[in-house]
Amino acid sequence: QDRIDWSCKYADPVIEELWDGLKAGANGNLDTFRTNVRALYPGLDADRKYSRMDLEQLAAKFERTGIATAESLSAFIRDFTRIFKFLLDKNRISNPEGARLAMQGLGPLLRMAVLNRLQISHPNHNPLDPYLLPDIFTAARFVLDFTIASGSYQTGGSSVGAGITSTEGASGFGSRAS
């Protein structure tokens, strides 16, 4: 009973009020109290840690904000891989769906450059089949390394530079612009 009382005492006042209501139902049993508290927080269920919506929202966020640096690409890859691996292990997503969402998260400008890089590096790849995630991420790193080194990459609006040319927000590899 003391551990239950101390748990409630050190909680935020709003949480304390909520948990105090659970003390009576636990009858002094700490395990019952813990079970009742955990039932209020479905995010604690290890089986429901992430959903497809989490991955879709991540892709949409990065598509909207753009990826223009190695740091932002690395952040996207880390977050994407963490959620995707969880969903894949639970059979809640397929590799092709993951590849589609990864490409979406790159944003239109980087996506086109990555697609062009993938076509060069995988010339025999069937265009109807999705690329593998490691290949997508490797191509994205290559494109960013190439374009950042030349100082030519922007994530939105108009961008012209070595390897990437765009005036409408979507692009591909073109000739070197002056």
Image: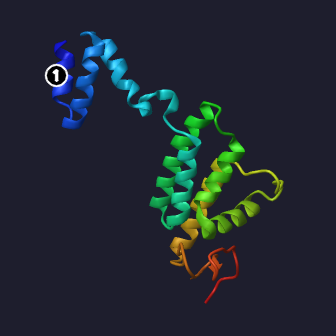
The C terminus appears in which quarter of the rendering?
bottom right
Image location (x, y in percent) of residue 6: 16, 22
Q: Residues within 10 Å of mark 1 (few under 14, many from 20)?
A: few
At x 64%, y 35%, the residue is 92
Residue 146 sits above or below residue 94 on the image: below
Residue 128 shows in this picture: yes
Residue behind mark 1: 6
Where residue 19 sits, quadrant-wise, is: top left
Decide: is 58 above or below 153.
above
Left or right relative to 177: residue 29: left
* Quadrant of the frame with the N terminus: top left
Please count the marks in the image: 1
Residue ID at (25%, 15%): 24
Q: Secondary structure at mark 1?
A: helix
Q: Residue at x 72, y 46 (%)?
A: 96
Please state which of residues 66 and 54 is positioned toward the viewer in this rendering: 54
- Residue at screen point 38% across, 29% down: 40
132 sits to left or right of 140: right
> Residue 82: horizontal and vertical position, in percent?
51, 41
Amino acid marked by disc 1: Trp
Q: Position of residue 43 (x, y in %)?
A: 43, 34
Q: Where 145 falls versus 93 (above or below)?
A: below
| Outermost residue toward the bottom in this view | 178
